[in-house]
Amino acid sequence: MDEDESRCMAIAEPLLRDFYQAWSAAFGMYRAKYPEEVIAEHDDTTAANCIRAHMWTEVVRRFDRRAGCTLLNVRKLKVLNYRDLLVFRFKKVNSEGRHHNYQTKQQRDFDDQLPLPGIPAAATRLTSGYQPDAIGDVIERIIISRPMGQQTTWAAQVNLSGDTASWVDITPVRLPGTERIDFRARKRPSK
């Protein structure tokens, strides 16, 4: 387990129950309130956009007036700033906690932990996400992950038992020599 993961998840602990319940409510809104014939016409991107929109509504409901929480809209990037220590964006993710959509420069900078106007420079940027099952019928897991470039540095699964939230490390084990290489970060040799 990564030391950064333990630190971030300890800070995020007061938010975990609400994140879990908010994702469940957002996903439930989409699956239960949209007619089946409408859902059948949605591709994966449309479904994810609808669920994420409902998630943001849940985030506003739960965190807008909560101590330590600030909701930010940085050029259409909607994030939750928690105590200037953690900043969360909300996405559909895979089993590694990675999101897959067209990456704007702003999204890449967020994932690369680079400074962005309006976001505290020292805050760790994290993704709060849901992983649906293969047919998009149910949520398999709620995940908090720390992106870094094209990789996920670590990922934690959020669990809820009664009213108590907990988390477990689910970071995929990578064998030495199989790490992804970000060629953008490599420096060219000097002549």
Image: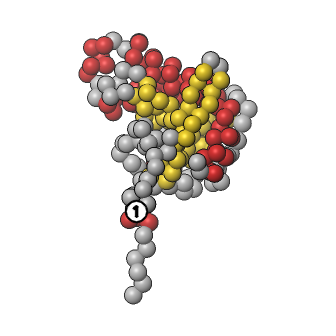
User: Going 40% across and 49% down the picture, which residue do you hit?
Assistant: 104
In the displayed structure, 31 sits above or below 65; it is above
**How has the structure been colored for display?**
secondary structure
User: Viewer-proximal residue, 164 or 107?
Assistant: 164
Say which amino acid is labelled 1.
Gly
User: Going 35% across and 25% down the picture, which residue do you hit?
Assistant: 136
Q: Is residue 100 left or right of residue 173?
A: left
User: Going 42% across and 70% down the picture, which residue do you hit?
Assistant: 186
- Please tell me in which quadrant of the rendered image residue 10 appears: top right
Instruction: Provide residue 91's location: percent of width, then percent of height.
Output: 46, 36
Instruction: Provide residue 141's location: percent of width, then percent of height.
Output: 47, 30
User: Viewer-proximal residue, 46 or 13?
Assistant: 13
For the question of whether residue 89 can be seen, the reply is no
- Please tell me in which quadrant of the rendered image residue 156 appears: top right
User: Going 65% across and 19% down the picture, which residue do you hit?
Assistant: 163
Instruction: Provide residue 135's location: percent of width, then percent of height.
Output: 31, 25
Instruction: Provide residue 174's location: percent of width, then percent of height.
Output: 44, 53
User: Viewer-proximal residue, 160 or 31?
Assistant: 160
In the image, farthest residue toward the front: 175
In the image, farthest residue toward the bottom: 191
In the displayed structure, 133 sits above or below 93; it is above
The residue indicated by pointer 1 is 177
For the question of whether residue 2 can be seen, the reply is yes
Q: Is residue 47 left or right of residue 169?
A: left
User: Viewer-proximal residue, 148 or 163?
Assistant: 163
Q: Secondary structure at mark 1?
A: loop
Q: Could you classify mark 1 by the number of other residues whose Cα lies within 10 Å: few (under 14), some (14-19), or many (20 or more)?
A: few
In the displayed structure, 73 sits above or below 115; it is above
